[in-house]
Amino acid sequence: MKEIFEKIHRYKEQDFEEGKPFEFTLEGKRKEINTEDYICPPSNKMEVGKSYKITVKKYMTEPATANFDFQDKCNEGKPMPLCIMQGEVIKETRGMYYMNLHGKAEPTSRCLVCGKTLTNPISKLYGIGPECSEKVGLIRIENEDDAKEKLKHIMAQIDDITWTGFVIKSAIKEWEEI
């Protein structure tokens, strides 16, 4: 029996004692009934029907290429417009979440479109850098007076950005329930 387990890539010597029954543990199995003490803690994942703020890797916001045609195959050629969006998980597959997402303008130090650190104080007010503003069709603002005057309009535009599609689970860098 030990020879069989040695062929398993995650096998460790301490997991197997001769003469003692071997027990496979499944995710979330508790050591004892009615305790919060887990042998293997349950994985932390998003749930269908709940809303989340997610940050994805850059490739989720880019069009399909010859080497990566995911957007064409799964999302009708429409990549996510922003790398930081929020919304509801509609359904889940083994490797993806199907989500209904929207933009949310907020003061931040990271660009909602590309995820880069924002250095422009005006851009930090609504969360999108000057280059990316043009990419998503926002007015480019050069000075603080213009920003204050047009801030509500720009924030409303960002909040109107919506997208529905499949998000690869491994592409999600961060998420938090909202």
Image (cartoon, grey):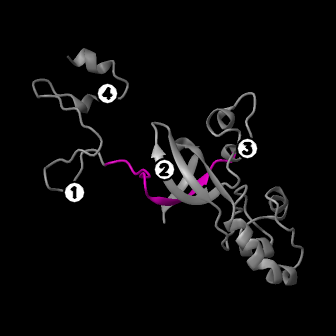
Indicate the quadrant where residue 155 lies: bottom right
In the image, 14: left or right of 72?
Answer: left
Cβ–Cβ below 8 Å for labels 1 and 4? no
- Mark closer to the observer (2, 3): 2
Q: Which residue is mark 1?
A: 36
User: How far from the left and from the top, in percent, is residue 149?
Assistant: 82, 83
Q: Which residue is mark 3?
A: 62
In the image, 141: left or right of 4?
Answer: right
- Mark closer to the observer (3, 4): 3
User: How far from the left and from the top, in percent, is residue 95?
Assistant: 49, 37
Q: Nearer the viewer, residue 139 or 162?
A: 162
The circle on residue 11 is: 4
- Which residue is at a point 88% across and 78% down the rendered structure image? 143
Instruction: Answer whether residue 55 is magenta in the image.
Output: yes
Label 3, residues with CA under 10 Å away: few <14, some 14-19, many ≥20: some
- Mark closer to the observer (2, 1): 2
Cβ–Cβ below 8 Å for labels 2 and 3? no
Q: Is residue 102 above or below residue 96?
A: below
Q: Which residues are magenta?
A: 42-58
Spatial CA distance of label 2 from label 1 is: 29 Å
Spatial CA distance of label 2 from label 4 is: 37 Å
Q: Nearer the viewer, residue 5 or 78?
A: 78
Going from N to C along the chain, the mark reached first, 1 or 4, is: 4
In the image, 69: left or right of 122?
Answer: left
Q: Which residue is mark 2?
A: 90
- Which residue is at a point 24% across and 32% down the rendered structure image? 14
Q: Nearer the viewer, residue 9 or 38?
A: 38
User: How far from the left and from the top, in percent, is residue 29?
Assistant: 23, 44
SS at circle 2: strand
SS at circle 3: loop
SS at circle 4: loop
- Which residue is at a point 64% across and 32% down the rendered structure image? 73
